Amino acid sequence: MESLLFTIYALATCGAALGVVLSQNVARMAFWLVVSLGCVAGLFFMLNADFVGATQLLIYVGGTVVLLIFGVMLTASGPFNTIKSEPAEMIQAGVIGIALLAILIPTVTSVDWVGNRDTLSHAGVKSPSGEFNQQGEGGTSRHIGAALLGVRVDQADASAPSEAHEHHEADHDHGHEHAHGEEAHSHAAHDHAHAQVSETNQASGYLLPFEIISVHLLVVLIGASYLARAKRRVEQPTS
Amino acid sequence: MTPVLAASTLTDWIDAQGISWLPEWGPVVLAAVVHVILLLTFFGLPAGIFIWAERKVSARIQDRLGPTRVGGRFGWLQSLADGVKLLQKEDLAPADSDKFLFRLAPYIVIVAAFCAFMFLPFSNGWTAVAMDCGLFVALAVLSLEVLGVVIAGYSSGSKWSLFGGMREAAQMVSYEVPLGLTAVIPVVVAGTMNLNDIGNMQQGMIWNWFVFQNPFTFLAFFVFFVATLASNKRAPFDLAEAESELVAGFITEYSGFRWSLFFLGEYAAMFFVSALGVVLFLGGWWTGIAPLDNWFVSIGESCWMGDYIVRVIGMKIFLVKSAILVCVQIWVRWTLPRLRIDQVMTTCLKYLVPIACFLFLGVVLYPLILVTVLGRTTLLPGSGVAMGERVPVPVVEAHDFHPEPGDVAAETVAAPQEEEH
């Protein structure tokens, strides 16, 4: 069932992405982009990352693409302006695309997914469970909110020192079965998680950086609107 | 007996029946089918009823009779007759249009409006998809509706449609800001984005409803209502259609079935935002009279299938409240004249956004001020939901996980709660 849904969403994402590349009409490109991004949101929902999925829908599909189409409508000279690619551009884009694929495929295939899952389960990190309940499917938003305040609910069980020690031992036992590099890696990851918890106990979490970023965005927004207005003001006396 | 009408519990229930021939994915698919059928009912039926109500109410406001003949006395089958008529019409696409996008646009509108219903709790626990961030997802999905309108306007190959689409895009993008800000205000009060939890927190007497929670939420409800009017392109904000200037705006070139899809989507969205307003501000499925609610709940606990009966009653209350809000929308539409596009933008950017920001700030500061001055989070003793009660919940969970005394972050978060005691 899950793999079927995943196949549908993944195929739709890829197909729509191809549609963005292959269609020559700007509005249709935007439409295919919506389909592609929407299906990525669907994939997020399937991963129980409902907050990320909703954010994807709200910001990319509902916000960015609508503004994109709005821009197209305002700037289009003809009713439907088409973009014809030059052969040189197509070759350039193809080379870049293939190069990216050449990086991505080895990256994906080189990860030992099964081994990593075992390592993580031994390290006490819960994998996101597929079950959904009536209280809240996915239930990520509360954790995100707590993390903003500096309480990492997802890492809380690793913070108790005795437990952490046990996990270390478990890691040791587990590490013998795997390559040495991976053992070191799992150690590093675990130590990192431990450090993060003890750090956030003193710090105020991610709220301050988050606020700084949002105020920054607001400044950018006001600046952009100011620049756009100033330009028009210069033009008005000449016309 | 647990309430079966939620996706997860329905799945569990079918699982528990132990039907041997059912494949592994059977319960999920069955639950999904049941929910889709139920939601389609709640999607299509109110839309039809409200279209009829719109015609009757507008007729009465304009001193006419409205539909009188179809289906007996009040013309109550008028919507059905219209639907049959629209189905028979030819499905046209103008020669200048982008045919593919032109045909597709109504479906975007209808899918967006329908998907928003998935996250709406119709009664306590009766949600198709219960989510921790249900409000956020619902608003995100609803915001996709504008895409269909804009694409319809663009792909029609007509100047009227293009203008309608452009106006709609500008209006929607602007009004989403006050809509989002005012929708967050009940979230601040409740401390959760789960719509079901927000509804349940307004249990009790009428002053427990979030409208009457404090002066800021009271004003926020009206800003929310105005913003939903605008985001539904209802008059006085129906600039996208503006019959007197743009023929019919973005739906100028549509006919027959696709045209009716736009209307179905519009009325369903009207119902949806009204229902959202009811859940967020107007007490959801609670009557607002505590003894009555308690009586219902006691019935539910005492007799067989009582839970169902209570939930059905709750759903009826919910639907009636939503329908009243829809009627107010209709009333507003036929009473107020249409604004100009610059007035629409001024209303939003110069008035509603600052007001919403102020209300947001106020609703955040209000409990803090009350705590400082009165020593409690509600104005009257023993009334209303204590604000911010729910906020430290994850901290309590974290304490269970690692009961360390030196947890600075948890202490600072829990501090406001300690002050109350």
Image: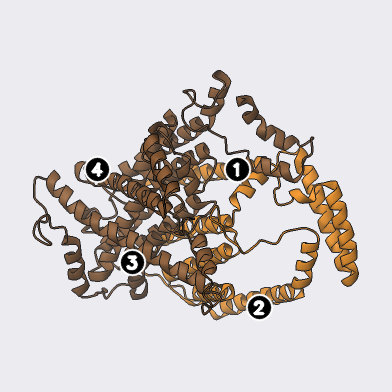
Chain colours: A orange, B brown
- Viewer-nearest residue: B116 or B160: B116
Placement of the N terminus of chain A among the 4 image quadrants: bottom right
Q: Residue drawn at (20%, 52%), measured in percent from left and top?
A: B53
Q: Which residue is mark 4?
A: B332
How far separated are the C-alphas under marks 3 and 4?
Answer: 26 Å
Residue A22 horizontal side relative to residue B325, left or right: right
Most distant residue in the top direction: B373
Specify the amino acid type for callout 1.
Answer: His
The label nearer to you, 2 versus 3, is 3
- For disc 1, the chain is A
The label nearer to you, 1 versus 4, is 4
Tell me, yes or no, whether dots 1 and 2 are on the same chain: yes
- For disc 4, the chain is B
- Viewer-nearest residue: B12 or B331: B12
Q: Position of residue A218 (x, y in %)?
A: 55, 42
How packed mark 2 is, by other alpha carbons closer than 10 Å (few <14, some 14-19, many 20 or more), is: few
Tell me, yes or no, whether dots 2 and 4 are on the same chain: no
How packed mark 3 is, by other alpha carbons closer than 10 Å (few <14, some 14-19, many 20 or more), is: many
Question: Helix, strand, or loop for circle 2?
Answer: helix
Question: Helix, strand, or loop for circle 1?
Answer: helix
How far separated are the C-alphas under marks 1 and 2?
Answer: 36 Å
**Label whose residue precedes the other's in the sequence (1 or 2):** 2
Question: Helix, strand, or loop for circle 3?
Answer: helix
Q: Which residue is mark 3?
A: B106
**Label whose residue precedes the other's in the sequence (3 or 4):** 3
Q: Which residue is mark 1?
A: A216
Specify the amino acid type for callout 3.
Answer: Pro
Q: Which residue is mark 2?
A: A98
